[in-house]
Image (cartoon, grey):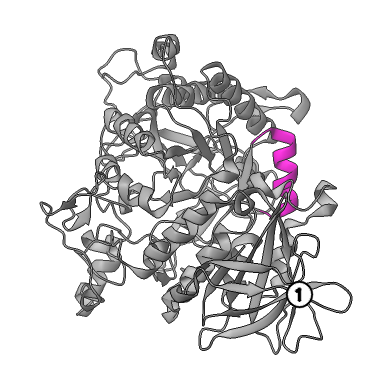
Amino acid sequence: MAVERSVAELDLGELTRGRAFHLSPAAWEDEVLYFLMLDRFSDGNERGFVANDGAVVNSGATPPFSDGDRNNAIGTPDDAARWRDAGARWCGGTLKGLASKIGYLQRLGVTALWVSPVLRQVAFQDTYHGYGIQNFLDVDPHFGTREDLRDMVRVAHDHGIRVVLDIILNHAGNVFTYDADRFWTDDGSGHWFLDPRWDNAPYRVRGFNRGTGEPTLPFAPLPDGPDQPNADAIWPRELQQPGTFTTKGRINSWDYDPEFREGDFFDLKDIHLGTGELGDYQPSPALKALCDCYKFWIAYADLDGFRVDTVKHMDLGAARYLGSVMHEFTQAIGKENFYLIGEITGGRVRAYDTLEQTGLDAALGIDDVPDKLEYVAKGFREPTDYFDLFRNSLLVNKDSHVWFRNKVVTMIDDHDQVRKGNDKARFAAGGTPDALMLAGLALNATTLGIPCIYYGSEQAFDGAGGNDRYLRECMFGGPFGAFRSRDRHFFREDFSVYRELAKVLDLRRRHIALRRGRQYLREISGNGIDYGLPHMIGGEIRSVVPWSRLFDTTEILCAINTDAGAPRAASVMIDRDLHADGSTLTCLYSTAGGEIGQSLGVASLPDGTRVVRLTVPAAGFVMYM
């Protein structure tokens, strides 16, 4: 299919007329998301993995990882440098590779993919992450073709998995070069240059960049006709118009408004989205053109949702316009619950206010959620600090579960870990036991919110370092494999964390209480007399941490053990109205598999409170009903 060069060439009517599109889920809190960076996931050349149809594939070149392959890429200082450098460049993941691993994800229990941006990037930079878009109407050739995107979505749908695509409206890639005239700056080596950083005044522009990087094209609409290479400047043609970009230079102060809304993300160029206050916001021609582009991708590929990048840096009016346009378009074609998940950094208050004012459906990037998820599981945060996140009564004035149940995407690992500054580290870094990795993922999957697994967490990836690249290891091995390896893939369905997480997610699928139920942190006692919420002692907690999910007449009791060295036991309070004295709870899951099916007796305290005596294996997770 030829790539359109203008939104005026798009025929959405032709794409949508008479088609039956994939239906939206009734409730997104029923879904389990899986976030992958496409360049780092699969190149389709693996050997010894289980295909979508359940057959073992032995035709590829890359064998599976084994423990003896750890550190095989860093045997010498030169090897280590090559491995590190590879993490900053394109590594080779493709849409076809992803399509070949849909079965791996289905068997894990994933029901919705969040795929990093796939649109065409600037050709002269290694923006493998996808956030440097140069053509909003084409797929980047590193990833494949438009047809490959459509085929991948079809395969996912055939396996019961929906697809959420990461999109960007706030900025484009490095599509033009400034002619800076202020802010002389030393680059640290004695070389002085003019640094175009934000000071609330526009900069002159040398010109649009060619595909080779030279800014030798006029900063103006390119001549009509097909002669201009697809990799030059920016496309579609509407985005070449004057006024598309704010041209105010890069953000220097990330918390100063309007700088963080008007400035560039480093060399990614900020797009002017409109003017006015929220109630009378006037979308710019660029925003309208971008919305038309994303309507096209919904219709063309049958997408199920968008993850909207950098919402904090957009005008609220622009986010509201996007929400209205996308929801109306998708409802018109039968996708009644197309989900818009906004990356909204800056805390829960900002996230709540942004969703309420814009009509976006859910928030991602609330930094205190992943922080407390990780460190409660590891025993270095108060359990109340995590569970109280979901009450939020001052914000919503509703019961604890109403807003967070389907309005917040929760996850432990992610691709940039803004919350950790320059000390990036996956959950499993630093020798964290695999069992504790599973406990963290289970805590995420069985507490409130829409749970999201970051690719590689189910394989206990342990990336750490001073740069985002260390969080973006290749599942398919290649030049930048996990565990400092190369040329070994990680689609290991016999790996303990993958295998046990699949069991937990299957129980989540089968029990509505784990998806939609109310949530309560439970009091515990060591002596059966004195009860209280689990808490830290001396800066850590090594204890059973239990919680209940209640839905209608069902209670499911879950618990982790934050002690990785020994099992822990405690008496745990449960709902007195749902359990008679002398009744039992049955073990649905335990990391000590022999306990599954065993029963706990329900006892009564003198005041009528119901309790059970619970034992959780070291770094373990259990579930009773």
Pick the residue in front: 236 or 395: 395
Does residue 242 appear anywhere in the picture? no
Q: In which image quadrant can residue 71 be found?
A: bottom left
Residue displayed at 71% across by 64% down? 387
Task: Say left or right for 39 vs 509.
Answer: left
Q: Quadrant of the N terminus?
A: top left
Q: In this view, does 8 lie above or below 435?
A: above
Residue closer to the observer: 510 or 619: 510
Instruction: Give the residue at x 56% y 44%.
Output: 30
**Is residue 347 on the magenta stretch?**
yes
Lateral position of residue 37 relative to residue 319, left or right: left
For label 1, the SS is: loop
Horizontal side, residue 542 vs residue 307: left or right: right
- Which region of the structure is painted magenta? 346-360
Q: Is residue 85 above or below residue 515?
A: below
At a point 44% along the width and 50% down the height, the residue shown is 35
The C terminus is located in which quarter?
bottom right
Q: Where is residue 19 in the image (x, y as percent from the top left)?
A: 41, 15
Q: Does the magenta stretch include residue 540?
A: no
Identify the residue position indicated by label 1 in the image. Answer: 523
Residue in the foreground of this view, choosing between 175 and 138: 138
Toward the right, the furthest residue is 607
Q: What residue type is labelled 1?
A: Glu
Secondary structure mainly formed by the magenta segment: helix
Q: Where residue 343 sits: x, y (%)?
A: 58, 46
Please provide percent x and percent y for residue 42: 27, 51
Instruction: Using a 10 Å C-alpha cutoff, classify the residue at mark 1 as few (fewer than 14 neighbours), some (14 to 19) or many (20 or more).
Output: some
Give the answer, above or below, for where 518 lies relative to 31. below
Is residue 458 positioned above or below 525 on the image? above
Residue 446 visible: yes
